[in-house]
Image: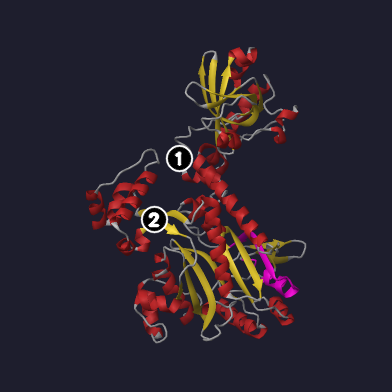
Amino acid sequence: MHIIMVNDILRECMDKYREIIEKYEPYPYIDLDDMKHYNLDRVEVIVRENTPKIKWNREVKVAGRIMALRVHGALSFADLYDEGYRIQLFVSKDMLKEKYDWFIGNVRRGDIIWVKGPLFRTKRGELSVKVNDYKMLAKCMYVLQHTWIGIEDPELRLRKRYLDMVLNLEVFERMKTRFNIIREIRLWMYSHGFYETDTPILQPVYGGAAAKPFITHVNALDEDWFLRIAPELYLKRLLVAGFNKVFEIGKVFRNEDIDVTHHPEFSMMEAYIAYADYNDMMELAEQLISNLALKLTGGHLIRYPVDLERVGTWYLERLDRDKVREYLEYTLWSYGGRKRKISVGSSTINEFLKNPIKWLKKRIGEARLYMEINLRPPYPRYRLLDLLREHIGIDPETISDREIMKLLEQRQIVIKGGYNRDIALVKLFEHYIEKKLVEPTFVIDYPKGSSPLAKPHRRNPKIVERFELFIAGLEVANGYTEQNNAYEQYIAFCEQEERRRLGDEEAQEPDYDFVEALCVGMPPAGGIGIGIDRLVMLFTGITSIKEAIPFPMAKRAKFT
């Protein structure tokens, strides 16, 4: 059979395979019970148990990837990695006899092998496995870059994330944190009596958010359907059906721009509680996020590189000099590769405080300062209209539409579908204020026209019982007291349809079947959506959402 290779890398890999297969089988079956996963010793457990007081002598069986190999005649050392944990292999001719020559002749960086042998400490005190048996399990045909260089092309890093995780332990650990976050969210929700549900990803009518959808065609029905922009309307149908506490963790899809905080495919958790309101959902957010902090860090403090260009330097005025010193030292240490501790003197602090943004850009290339953020509840709550008064100096209840439009024009803020006062006020908040909210902050009570699925405030029908949670300038959660009045929901959908007709592509498409569901009767309820990817950003200290996603979008590779 004639095989056409699509690029040089694959050609080299296939050439290497044809050469190796003449010598040995590079991808054998597991033929010993000792190699099965249930009989393997986890390197993580071995490393965690390792203390100077323990005198190891027991035999272990481990498997993993060889990431370093040092040959010294009849003695060799190798670094084996298993799920991010490293253990040294002590490989000697005295122990392996003729199998030693095969090892040094065929085992290379990147190969996945199984080894068996007793644990012991070398003369330098390093815990090692004295290998008395081994087997090649999977040959690495790829020429791996050195771990201290990694993948230099940023687009290639995203396309070949599997390779990025092999070469960069920090990326691997970040993904472990992501998966642990999802697990801990599930466990917390289960422990609080929620049913985990699954709702359609392909939907005949999209809804639950203001976003432009992805469109696909269902051949069997000969209809255009949509990838969901939110699971909200189906989860609320379950409330109608009689379930009182439901949640879903899954992917949603919004055909929007890609930037440091937005990605067309992202993960979120949505939850709904019958006989509740937005106050209950804010308490849920506080308890869930503080529990995540305890599980992941053992406390409530996290460090995050806050962008002073977005936040402003006013926040530094609240800090004493010792705290500024601590933040500066941690920032310089982190951006310097975390190799050695850095001390900062008084003169450096004085220089920094004169012009923090300029100083940081000169030293580390961007105006980011690692700051401590306390996730311990309760989080303060501020009304959106009050924040507009405080930060912009306008009275949102008396300012004229002409003055609002002038503010929008100054900042080149465009409202698709035409001017709407309520939407304009929220746009001003998003542009001027949300980026300044470093500590966990609930912004509550939004103008009614900005939130078509929320219930009007019980004391002021011009606003709705909605909140957003901001941490480090990122919107982390959004929720409200759910609209359960079928007539009011129908009117809101009609208003959204008119905005769509006027050119607002993100206005919600009316879902009249959902209105019918409300006619059956939905109990008073509260709902919340929490962005999983942004939680990962917060808990791992990264500033780009792409780095929080295992396999983010990237332009396709061009094959020859």
Amino acid type at circle 1 is Glu
Q: Quick one: 76 or 281, which is closer to the camera?
A: 281
Placement of the N terminus among the 4 image quadrants: top right
- Above/below status of 11 relative to 284: above
* Residue 140 screen position, x and y as percent: 60, 30
Q: Residues within 10 Å of mark 2 (few under 14, many from 20)?
A: many
Which residues lie in the magenta part?
230-253
Q: Quick one: 234 or 477, which is closer to the camera?
A: 477
| Residue 76 in sight in this render | yes
At 40% from the left and 75% from the top, the residue drawn is: 387
Amino acid type at circle 2 is Met
Mark in the foreground, 1 or 2: 2
* Residue 403 screen position, x and y as percent: 36, 82
For label 2, the residue is 371
Kindly give the residue lying farthest to the right in the view shown.
220
- Above/below status of 36 relative to 442: above
Q: Quadrant of residue 36?
A: top right
For label 1, the residue is 152
Mark 1 element type? loop
Q: Quick one: 299 or 388, which is closer to the camera?
A: 299
Report the Cα–Cα distance between label 1 and label 2.
Answer: 28 Å
Q: Quadrant of residue 214?
A: bottom right
